[in-house]
Amino acid sequence: MKVIFRKNEKVVIVSFDTLSDRFDSDYERNKFFKDLYGWKQTVPGHRKSYNYRRPGLLDGIPHQRISSSVFMVAMEHMKRIEDFFDQWRRKVECDMIEVVLERERMLKRLRREQDQI
């Protein structure tokens, strides 16, 4: 669920790093990502395949994905995010940085950068 944040809204940038050697298996590490981001399931049928979207935590929370391990959410949704990462605390390092989003200033900066390209 992608969202555009409001001007001067308090948001949190969440950055995480999976500690691969602490996971019991690749299956468990993949479970972390599926639980967070959701996943697409393809089920072969007799004459065609059926595709299903299996939701993850972020499917129900307005967010902006910045990279594969960084995303931004409004402060009001942080309890759910903190609870999720708390379940994985022994296997995933997570940093959360609170910022006030100055939307107009960011848009101007992005436009300047695009003009220089």
Image (cartoon, grey):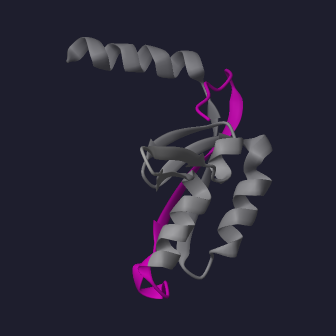
Percent from the top left, x then y, of residue 81?
70, 56
Quarter of the picture holding the C terminus: top left
Q: Nearer the viewer, residue 93 or 40?
A: 40
Percent from the top left, x then y, of residue 95?
57, 61
**In this rendering, does residue 19 appear at all?**
no
Task: Give the answer, above or below, for where 11 lies relative to 37.
Answer: above
Q: Nearer the viewer, residue 33 or 108?
A: 33
Q: Quadrant of residue 100?
A: top right
- Name the residue: 69% across, 25% down: 8
Counting labels gives 0
Q: Left or right? Give the position of 24 relative to 99.
A: left
Percent from the top left, x then y, of residue 12?
64, 45
Quarter of the picture holding the N terminus: top right
Residue found at the very far front of the displayed protein? 46
Residue 100, magenta (yes or no)? no
**In this rendering, does residue 93 appear at all?**
yes
Task: Give the answer, above or below, for where 66 lies relative to 41.
Answer: above
Percent from the top left, x then y, of residue 76?
79, 42
Task: Give the answer, above or below, for where 53 lies relative to 91.
Answer: above
- Name the residue: 63% across, 76% down: 89
Q: Left or right? Give the position of 48 relative to 95.
A: left
- Name the residue: 42% across, 78% down: 26
Q: Which residues are magenta?
A: 1-26
Q: Quadrant of residue 86?
A: bottom right
- Name the residue: 67% across, 36% down: 62
Q: Left or right? Give the position of 100 relative to 104.
A: right
Q: Left or right? Give the position of 46 relative to 87.
A: left
